[in-house]
Image (tube, grey):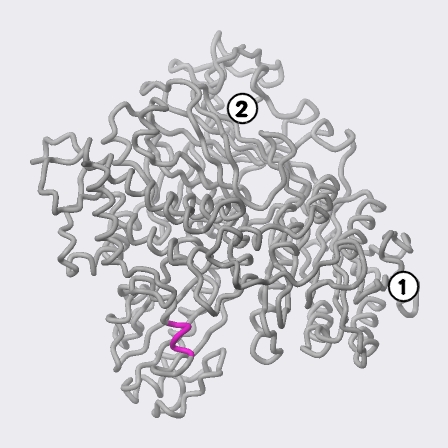
Amino acid sequence: NGRSLKPPRLFLCVCKTAVLSVLQIQVIEDDRANKSSEPFTTGVKGQTPPLVTTNFQVKDQGNASPRFVRCTAYNIPCTADMAKQSQVPLAAVIKPLAMLPPDETRPYMVDHGEAGPIRCNRCKAYMCPYMQFIEGGRRFQCGFCSCVTDVPPHYFQHLDHTGKRVDCCDRPELSLGSYEFVATVDYCKNNKLPQPPSFIFFIDVSYNAVKSGMVNIVCQELKTLLDYLPRENPEADSVVRVGFVTYNKVLHFYNVKSSLAQPQMMVVSDVSDMFLPLLDGFLVNVNDSRMVIESLLDQIPEMFADTRETETVFGPVIQAGLEALKAADCAGKLFLFHSSLPIAEAPGKLKNREDKKLVGTDKEKSLFQPQSGFYSNLSKECVAQGCCVDLFLFPNQYVDVATLGVVPVSTGGSVYKYTYFQAEMDRERFLNDLRRDVQKPMGFDAVMRVRTSTGIRATDFFGSFFMSNTTDVELAGLDCDKTVTVEFRHDDKLSEDTGALMQCAVLYTSCSGQRRLRVHNMAVNCCSQLADLYRNCETDTIINFFSKYAYRSLLNTPTKTVRDTLVNQCAQILACYRKNCASPSSAGQLILPECMKLLPVYLNCVLKSDVLQPGADVSVDDRAYLRQLLSCMDVSESHVFFYPRLLPLVRHTILHQWSLPMAVRNSEERLSKGGVYLLETGLYLFLWVGANAQQELLSNIFGTPTFSQIDPNMTSLPELDNPFSQRLREIIDSFRSQRSRYMKLMVVKQEDKAELIFKHFLCEDKSASGGASYVDFLCHMHKEIRQLLS
């Protein structure tokens, strides 16, 4: 009636599936229609941003852009009791070094000279728009702890009639949500300005690695890729130094000093006590040593072409990189190209412990835990040095990703996995991943701290990092794709008048060797009415948090218990809404808050994921890999990971240059035999071709009018001279550019054996591993809610 104080809600009669079928797509399309035309301005406190599926522009007016920070709720409960009653998690997904679109300004750099950034005397929060200047501008009161601090003379400025500094709009730290400070020597290790970082490439040259073609591909690519090392100024040369090591069960170090005519190899066969056999000539400037490096990269595939050595080491490889960075007194990144379980006699040696019989039992959690404490201890040393590890795996069998991934995950690194790597089929995906990994902006030797205003505090953290205390998130490396998810809890009552504040500060070394502070600020509202909480939640962020919480719980809790806990918490959230916010109605109706319409469908996708409910063909390594991968995903990537995007390729909609075809529900019943569909999962792209697809459509896409002549092994579409082919390839390129991993294209013909893989991602249908269809899960969820209410 327009006068109700209760939030809008959705009534669903669970027996009517027709209502459900448009939900997910309609919510996304409505958000696009309502929120993509005008810029999202961050100046209004507690404003819920557009969905991650909406294309929008951000204008920073005092709160961090949703590209940097997304919250589960933008109007949080005033009390711990109210938060407990609702069961809505209070969390933020923070992506500190996120890349911004070309039409948005990257955070400004603020340099206060030798004095360094202005901070609160008590809580050490950095100067931001929430500090209030008093006594004519001579002092400021902290928005986080209310302490009053003197303004240094060099920073003094008069106040206007509203109490704001007259230079407020000229200073990023007083007017924007995100900005950077140049850090002084006080913020550096041992009070010494840092050296530029180094990259070290470790190439496995055992039999499997050579035979698969991996060694040859890596060596050829590095010759070009070294021209694209990260740099601040695109016009200047990169100051990142590089080094090269090959290994099997021994390590071969290479001297590539510019004065040498040929590279020199030095072998370390005693891997039980790893040391660096050379200092001068190991880490070099690319331009100075280019001839020697290219000669080395040409020789490596030839040197090991006839190898019969099948065993590899792994622990000593990381130890060698760590020793090299220590000797050079710099931070850096190790790139490991590795193929097999490290069974050679050496520190960190592993055994094959894959046991499918443990899946579904209480002992299943042991499969996700590392075999020993060796790699955890090594991680600690790496983080102390600022040594980040990226691991590229090329396994043909079990390699124990749960253990090999410990160092990458603890140092802010990444794991890439190319199972049964075939040079022809997987080359493009691997090289695109490698190129992006080497070139992307990143910081080194980083420490992140999250400060909050009185009443709440950060209590838990999720992501790829190390913590030696309860407050500092330590990252040997932090790139533009990584997120840190933070959970908050009450430690006092909050006020509706003042709201709640959060400040994330990341201290890091740039790729040019400059020490910096990246600061993101966020202010949210506080409420004493549950209806206000339910009106301002963000479902995609809630699902991102729930999935990370659940995936981490697998280390200590049986899978079934983790799944049941998720269902129970979701039911409690919706039951609390039904009981306290919704109008009285029939018990046969499922009533959902407007902004949580999609919570059940997305939660069901999390429950059916390979990590929580694997099919018989999903390996333990795959589950460990996906568990690690999700831990630092942002909200847009977790969204498509759990609910893939399914687009019908219809001629008249595809040829609209300015928009994509409208997606359809992720269900087999939406597929037409006469159609062609593109499915994006975030890790793969599938092109599904119906058996009765029109000849003209097939000719435009594949260059053949006949279904039987389509090659299902193709991984890229032919470049045909017609508008449809051109537009479809543009869409595929656009999808790939939005993701941090290169998505391999798989062509799936209807009723082909590959269709089973494709159908696995149709997440609204019942899954082969026993996961419920969306409709069945909705009925189950309704039953759970009714039980809680009764």
Q: Position of residue 649 (x, y in %)?
A: 31, 74
Front position in the image: 273 or 390: 273
Q: Is residue 378 left or right of residue 642?
A: right
Residue visible at 33% across and 54% down in the picture: 604
Front position in the image: 510 or 360: 360
Which residue is the extreme one toward the left?
1
Element at badge 1? strand
- Name the amino acid, label 1: Val
Label 2 crowd (10 A; few <14 / some 14-19 / many >=20)? some
**Numbered label attached to residue 790:** none
Q: Where is residue 102 in the image (x, y as percent from the top left)?
A: 47, 52
- Name the amino acid, label 2: Met
The residue pinned by badge 1 equals: 267
Q: Where is residue 544 in the image (x, y as percent from the top left)?
A: 42, 47
Q: Position of residue 429 (x, y in %)?
A: 56, 70
Q: What stretch is highlighted in magenta?
A: 754-758
Front position in the image: 520 or 145: 145
Front position in the image: 124 or 307: 307
Q: Quadrant of the N terminus?
A: top left
Q: Is residue 478 left or right of residue 309?
A: left
**Magenta span contains residue 89:** no
Residue visible at 40% across and 79% down in the picture: 748
Label 1 crowd (10 A; few <14 / some 14-19 / many >=20)? some
Q: Of callouts 2 and 1, which one flags the residue occurring earlier in the amino acid sequence?
A: 2
Frontmost of labels 2 and 1 is: 1
Q: Is residue 239 above or below residue 621?
A: above
**Numbered label attached to residue 127:** 2
Task: Please identify the dominant SS of the magenta region.
Answer: helix
